């Protein structure tokens, strides 16, 4: 029996939550085109994915505040 679109999408989203250590949190938001372009440029210049670049930026900002 074929899966409907909602079932396939739910399964896809569940698979995306599986990170390297088996944990992940879904983050769904709308940002400005300028911020999206900036993130993409930063990621390319660092040789990272946008996800990895965002995680790096958040970690570095948090460290700067808590150090």
Image (cartoon, rainbow, N blue to C red):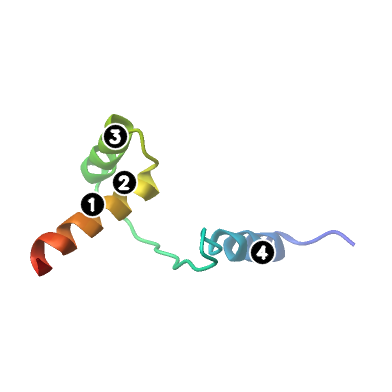
Find disc 4 in the rendering and name its residue: 11
Quick check: can you spot residue 44?
yes
Find disc 2 in the rendering and name its residue: 53
| First along the sequence among labels 1 and 3 | 3
Residue 57 shows which numbered tag?
Answer: 1
32 is higher (above) or lower (below) than 63: above
**Residue 18 appears at what percent x and percent y?**
56, 63
Q: Residue at x 51, y 64 (%)?
A: 21
Q: Residue at x 90, y 62 (%)?
A: 1
For the residue carrying disc 1, how many other residues have a C-alpha within 10 Å: few (<14), some (14-19), or many (20+)?
few
Circle nearer the viewer, 4 or 2? 2
Q: Residue at x 79, y 61 (%)?
A: 3
Given contact means CB atoms under 8 Å apart, are the residues at marks 2 and 3 in contact? yes
| First along the sequence among labels 3 and 4 | 4
Given contact means CB atoms under 8 Å apart, are the residues at marks 4 and 2 in contact? no
Q: Nearer the viewer, residue 63 or 11?
A: 63
Q: Residue at x 32, y 32 (%)?
A: 44
């Amino acid at each position: 029996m074929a899966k409907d679109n909602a079932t396939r999408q739910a399964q896809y989203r569940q698979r995306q939550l599986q990170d390297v250590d088996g944990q992940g949190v879904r983050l769904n938001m709308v940002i400005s085109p300028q911020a999206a372009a900036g993130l993409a440029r930063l990621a390319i210049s660092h040789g990272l994915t946008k996800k990895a670049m965002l995680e790096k930026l958040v970690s570095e900002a948090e460290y700067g505040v808590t150090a």
